Each structure stands twice: as structure tokens, then as C-alpha cells.
Image (cartoon, grey):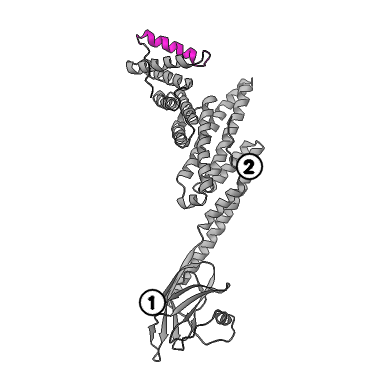
Amino acid sequence: MLRKYFYKTIAVFALSLVGGIAVFAQTYPITGMVEVKKSDDTTTPVEGALVEIFRVDQKGASLKDKTNKRGEFSFAGVVAGGTYILSVSGPGISPALSQNLKAGASDVKIVVSAGDGKRLTEEEVRAMLAGAPSTPTEVAEFTEESKKAEEERLKMIAEYEANKKKIESRNEQRNQLLAEGLKAFEAKNYDVAIVKFGEGYELSPDFVGSAPIMANNKALSLVKRALLNYNTMVQSKDAALKKELRPKVNADFEAALDTYYKAWMASKNGDPAEIAKIQVDFDKKKMDTLIGANEAVNLMVRTEGVSEAKKDIAMELVKEYVAAEKDQAKRADAQLYLGLYLNKVYDFENAVAEFRKAVQFDPKSADAVGQLGLALYTASYGSEDTAKKQEALNYLQMYLDMAPKDHSLRDGIDGAVVDLKNQKLKPQKIASN
């Protein structure tokens, strides 16, 4: 039975995409210096001046810094999007406010005059912002460099906002396509489901928050359509219909393997920062990709839909599945069906290797032992490789000793054993591992 590893978690999916948008939230520095104007109109840096940031639309000073020997201050984590003002105070100077600033402003120059060292309270700062009378202050002057920096900052903010809207729009599209694909899948309208999930994948094929989900769902829809057509084909008495459906079944299985591979690569090559945001969900979906791919290989064998063109993909995905699977019996079964897949595309050497692994996982499996013997026999047929023929006979005899009398492989193996014995070979006991 095909397991229904299908993803209906729209809320979780949406949450992962929101997490993807969060990477674009930015903070920028604000840097500058404080100078005091002397009676001769010259200026010198002010060391130890207190610089406080107030966000115009929020109460409370968010950050504070003191100027160094060169009169410099620097704030590294100012959140983009707000409007800020700096309040400067210190021993021997009058308080001063900067002009309105945005995150990213640099080379801000605040010129103060000599004074009594008064520090403005937040209420006084906000009163001045509102235009109410308060303590006289000097206003910040901007250098040409800071003006250029401000222009660049505004450009960056505009690009950020445009990019954010683009991502939000794409997020909405993904969720809409997911919902439409789910609805079609539940209605068994696999043609529409395949299209919708495919479109969802193509929106962001490299985004680990959505690409594996869309690709997995598309692959499962392809498998379901292949099975639907296969069942129709084998139950029909219409030769023309059978001829028409056979290539469709094969094509859907091939496309499913391709799509599972895309899901796997999207997960494997995903941005680590994005993966960290959805780690638990990500690990499950990654395993489900491998489970789905393994079952697709299994079904391709059972429906005679194997493809030599997809052999390498089948081998890679099953290998990854076996490495991740903890259940020994499932690992043995996966190796067995991969061996059968390779047998059907006449890659007997690789089939032998996979059947060996199946026997290692489950030495008591008559299917695995029998298939290994037959693969060795086939690979050695017509050759002078006596060692391989001997090994084939050993496993074939081992099969005969362990398999039920009505086992499906017995007739074919009986004939192979007779042929090998006629070549003057005798079965030898296989040493247990």
C-alpha cells in the first residue's frame, strides 16, 4: 500500500515562509561626532559627551553611547524604518539635539556650545520635537558625506520595502497554490494537483521553506496518477487503451523520481540559516522525501515501470533512504527492490551489489538470497567466470534449503541449479557472517 506522505499543514507552511521573510529585517548603524564651538568660531572634539537615541514615535531612549577622545560615537543596532533624534549632553557644554535621522546615517556632526552641562530629560526632548519652548540648543550640522550616506540609506530602505512586498506577494501565491493543489488532490484531480504544486515549486525552487514541500506533493500526485492509470490499464480489455496508458504510467513514475530528486536537492542544499528556523519540520519532510522516493522505486518494479534513464537517481535516493532508515527490515526491503530495479534494466553487476546488501540486512530472507543467486547466475552466464558461477550455485542452493515449496522463485532457481551442476559444479555451504 502506498503511504500517504502528503503535506496538508498550511499553517506550518505559512509560518516557515514568514520566517523566510524575517531574514530581510535589517538594522543599521548611526555614527558621527560631537564638537564644541569656541569663541573664535573654531571647533574641537568633545570627549565623554553622552549621546542618547530617541525614536520619535516611541517613548524611551533605546541606546546610549559616550564619545571617545576624538569626539566620535557609534550605534550599531538601530532598527530600520523608524525616525530618530540624538540628544547630546556633557560637562561644560550646552545640550543639543540632532536633526531627524534614519538608521544608517553616518558622519553625523553635532556642534554644541559651552554651557552648564545640563542633560535634557525625555520630556524636554519630546517637547522640543513638538515645537514647545524649552532650553536653547544647537542643531546638528550634516557633512556632505553624511548627506550621501543618507541618500544611500534611503535607497536601501526603498529596496528593502520593495523586496519585502515582493516576498510577501510570493508567500501569498505559494499558500494559494498549496491550497488549490490540496483541494485538487483530495478530489483525486491529480492533473490539476500536479500543475498547482509544480507552479508552487517553480516560484522558489531554491527556498528550503517551500520547495521540498511543493516538490514532494507534486511527486506523490504523479505516483497516484500513475497508479490510477496502471489499474485502469490492467483491468481493461481494450488493447488500444492499454497501449495508450502504458507510456503514461512510465512517464509519471519517471517524473515522480525526478521531482523527488528536486525535493531532496532543495533540502540538501538549503540555506542553513533558513533550515534552522524550521528544523523539526524540515527533518521530517526530508525523511518523507526519501520514503516517497523509495516507494516510487518499489512501485516502478511492481508495475513494470522501471526506467534505465532514471537508474542513477533511483540508486542515489534509495542509498540515502537506507542510510537514514533505522528499521533493519525496511532497509533490507529497499535494497531488494533496488536490486530488482537494476535487474530489469539489465545492470546485473550493480544488482548483485544491492542484493548482497539485502542479504546482509536480512540473511533469512528467501527473496534476497534467491535474487542474489539468480543475479550472480545471470551475470556469469556465457562467461568462464567459474568463481562467480560457484557463488551463484551456493546462494541458489541456500535458497532451495530455506524457501517454502510454493515460493515464486523456486521454478526458475531449480533450472539454474541444474544448469550449474551440469557444468560440474557442486554447491558449497556459505559461511555465516
Q: Within the image, what quadrant is residue 348 found in?
A: top left
Q: Residue at x 37, y 78 (%)?
A: 70
Q: Residue at x 62, y 39 (%)?
A: 192
Along the line of sight, the residue nearer the viewer: 189 or 341: 341
Determine the residue positioned at 34% across, 8% down. Answer: 424
Report the quarter where the N terminus lies: top right
| Residue 385 makes an appearance in the image | no
- What residue span does the magenta drawing correspond to? 405-425
Q: Which is more N-terminal, label 2 or label 1?
A: 1
Report the residue at 38% width, 22% height from top: 432
Residue lying at the far bottom in this picture: please name it.
39
Main SS class of the magenta portion in the image: helix
Task: Count numbered badges in the picture.
Answer: 2
| Cα distance between the residues tagged 1 and 2 | 61 Å
- Answer with the quarter of the image where residue 299 lies: top right
> For residue 407: magenta?
yes
Residue at the spot of label 2: 182
State yes or no: discs 1 and 2 in contact (Cβ < 8 Å). no
Nearest the camera: 373 or 208?
Answer: 373
Question: Mark 1 or mark 2, which is nearer to you?
Answer: 1
Q: In the rendered image, which quarter contains the C terminus?
A: top left
Q: Which residue is mark 1?
A: 68
Q: Position of residue 309 (x, y in %)?
A: 46, 31
Q: Secondary structure at mark 1?
A: loop
- Disc 2 crowd rating (10 Å Cα; few below 14, some 14-19, many 20+) is many
Residue 93 on image: x %, y %: 44, 86
Residue 325 screen position, x and y as percent: 48, 35
Residue 55 in view of the camera: yes
Residue 419 — which label? none
Tell me the crowding category of disc 1: few under 14, some 14 to 19, or many 20 or more residues within 10 angstroms, Cα based. Answer: some
